[in-house]
Image (cartoon, rainbow, N blue to C red):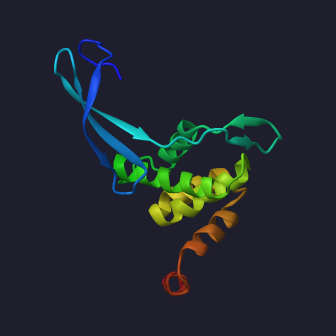
Amino acid sequence: MRCPVCNNSDTKVVDSRLSVDGMNIRRRRECEKCNFRFSTLEEMELLGLTVVKRDGRRESYSREKMVKGLEKALEKRPYTEMNLQQLVHKMERDIQKKRRGELTSREIGEILMKHLKGFDKVAYIRFASVYRSFDDVKTFEQELRSLLSPTKVARIRRKKK
């Protein structure tokens, strides 16, 4: 790892800490030449995973694409960068549990929706509306109903009357 100040390649690890979820390691480093201290973050990367798109095309898995989709769904919603990273790690863990080198975009989308549902229901609906291509308001309403418990649906119906 090169020093960000003097660009020297001789740095030493002073301290290493495992994250709470155990999915990454934060390392404190010190430059051997100028003694500047800096931190690095080492995290797991999914390698060799191919995503089969709806039209049959195949492309390499891209964490950045997944994060962009999540950020779009979470736009103007309250969340922290740390919470988003933990969410991504959980999703990637589920992807890894499949133990296959190839997954369909549909399988990945379902994993994302499963986790988004518990993370932020508004973001879930946003993501689902694009992912599942809601054709009309009825489809949208059905998805909303699935999020609400039966008692909440009954209360909403009573208010409408």
The percent position of residue 15, horizontal first and vertical second, equals 24, 40
Count the numbered circles shown: 0
Please provide percent x and percent y for residue 79: 36, 53
Q: Is residue 35 left or right of residue 72?
A: left
Q: Is residue 151 above or below residue 68?
A: below
Which residue is painted at 50% across and 44% down in the image? 72
* Quadrant in the picture for the N terminus: top left
Residue 56 point in image, percent of width and height: 83, 41
Considering the image in quadrants, where does the C terminus appear?
bottom right
- Identity of the residue drawn at 48% across and 60% down: 122
Picture quadrant of residue 119: bottom left
Which of these two is toward me, 48 or 90?
Answer: 48
Q: Nearer the viewer, residue 154 or 111?
A: 111
User: Residue 21 vs residue 91: left or right?
Assistant: left
Left or right: residue 87 compared with residue 135: left
* Depth order, front residue of 43/152: 43
Residue at (53% x, 61% y) in the render: 115
Residue 21 higher or lower than 81, as above or below: below
Q: Is residue 1 above or below residue 66?
A: above
Q: Residue at x 79, y 45 (%)?
A: 54
Instruction: Locate residue 66: give its quadrant.
Output: top right
Q: Where does residue 48 sit, x and y in percent of width and height?
A: 67, 38
Quarter of image, res 93: bottom right
